[in-house]
Amino acid sequence: MTEIAADSAQNKNKPIRASELDPKFKYELQKMHGSEKILKCFQCGTCTSDCPVARYSDDYRPRTLIHMAQLGLKDRVLNCNTLWLCAACFTCTDRCPQDVEVAAVIRVFRNLAVEKGCIPQVFKDQAQSLIESGYAYKIPDLRIKKRESQGLPPLPKGNAENVKKALKGVKFIEALQKPAGEKPSDQ
Amino acid sequence: MTNKYLIFLGCAIPYRVSSFEISSRKVLDKLGVELVEMPEFNCCGLPLDPVSHETMLIMAAKNLALAERQGLNILTLCPGCAGTLKKVNKILKADKALKEEINTHLKEINLQFEGTIEAKHLLQLLKEDVGIEKIKDSVIKPLTNLKVAEHNGCHILRPKEFIGFDDPEDPQTLKMLIEATGATCLDYIDETECCGAPSVGVSDKVALALAKDKLSHVKQVDAQALITICPFCHIMYDTNELRIEKLFNETYGIPILHYPQLLGLAMGMTPEELAFSDLRVSPSSMLKQLNQGANKA
């Protein structure tokens, strides 16, 4: 079974020190695509109470994450393993009475966590596959060949070269390609 | 505009769920929907959104721009792809600065996003372009003695702002389409809940618990099959049902069918034609029941 590590209770209950608060974090978030409305959250808890993942997880609480961000606990939010539990079902987004777009805010947190180097392996694999094949999963040759016998037309070309060209300048993709430098990246 | 669409397969369907593609193509052909093949398409971008929103935007815009060149609307079988392409189409059309930024990336490969086409999912196409009446007319073997449950999945319903063709709290489209085949569509608790698939690989514990509760609710109403319209939901249930039965000491035996497989049966196609042999959870007792009913009638 694949399980991300739970955030330790010690970490969760650690007293908040003024020195670890970043009062500007919420304003940074306000400028980012997806988390523009984070300050509208008044902590009603609709997101957490309707979240299917929160029902089965002892740790994942979207309301708490947003509260932490509003308070300026930037490092704690971005280091949270539970960030990655969101299933992107968008129930919170649709039901938020303040129209905060909660799932998009969580996505922004994840993007920022990735910039700090925190990324679960499953996402790394998909990104790698995208750069190498144009598809998020490496579709085995056998599958592609089988299409013919199944009466299916050929799969559209992934054109990895063009994918790479279009993604030039995207920080995340460039960082990903660096360690792969030892291997020949072109086919 | 005729019913002519560029078919967009995405990643999951060619990777693992060809039964969905096979049955969809057969059914659409019968309904007079013409599918045009694309020489080039990519991942829609959605799987990359959690790690890089920018990558998602560029990939989605690239696919939309490729389709614009052909001057045809996109039909997707995967709700994730439909949702992503719809959303990015809408966002880029509304935000000129963002559109320009994305277009500087596309310029590298001589493409440009203009916002001249639309993308929709199979379900929306069946409802809006083909129409329930035409689907009813195509049924020659009504599945009247079959009682099934539906699982819409998340991305066909939410966020409403971008998907918007059904009510996310009380969706009706898939139910109407199921009833058009003559089968009964049963209500059950938490119908619109997530299948858990997106949590696979991050926390299998959460993913399997979600799927387990759904299957239990479907079992409670004695559904003979669960009907899906998403490759990920299908993988989640079909691939994991046996594992969940073992893990939680339960017995379900509920076959998971793609909606086009159900419709295809009602159109008189055989289970072989509709790639039923790809299903992990055996549909044989359901099919037997169906035939018994047909013989009686």
Image: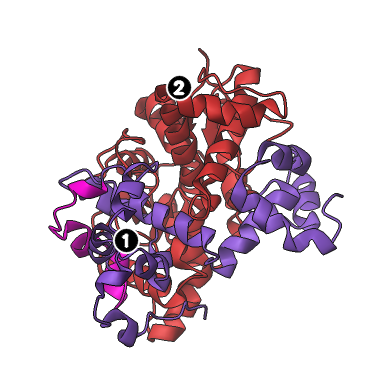
For this orientation, the residue located farthest to the top is B1
Percent across and percent down for residue B256 are: 46, 60
Q: Identify whether A129 is placed above or below A7.
A: above
In which quadrant of the rendered view does residue B114 lie?
A: top right
Chain ID, purple in image: A
Chain ID, red in image: B
Percent across and percent down for residue B193 are: 30, 58
Q: With A164 as the anchor, is B236 left or right in this view?
A: left
| Both marks 1 and 2 on one chain | no
For this orientation, the residue located farthest to the front is A19
On residue B13, the disc is none
Mark 1 or 2, closer to the camera: 1
Q: Which chain is home to disc 2? A: B
* Residue count near mark 2 (Cα–Cα under 10 Å), binned few <14, some 14–19, many ≥20: few
Q: Identify whether B84 is placed above or below B286.
A: above
Percent across and percent down for residue A98 are: 17, 45
Q: Write down the region rendered in magenta.
A: A38-60
In which quadrant of the rendered view does residue A68 lie?
A: bottom left
Q: SS at mark 2?
A: helix
On residue B96, the disc is 2
Residue that numbered label 1 is attached to: A22
> Residue A42 lies in magenta, yes or no?
yes
Q: Label 2 is placed on what type of residue?
A: Lys
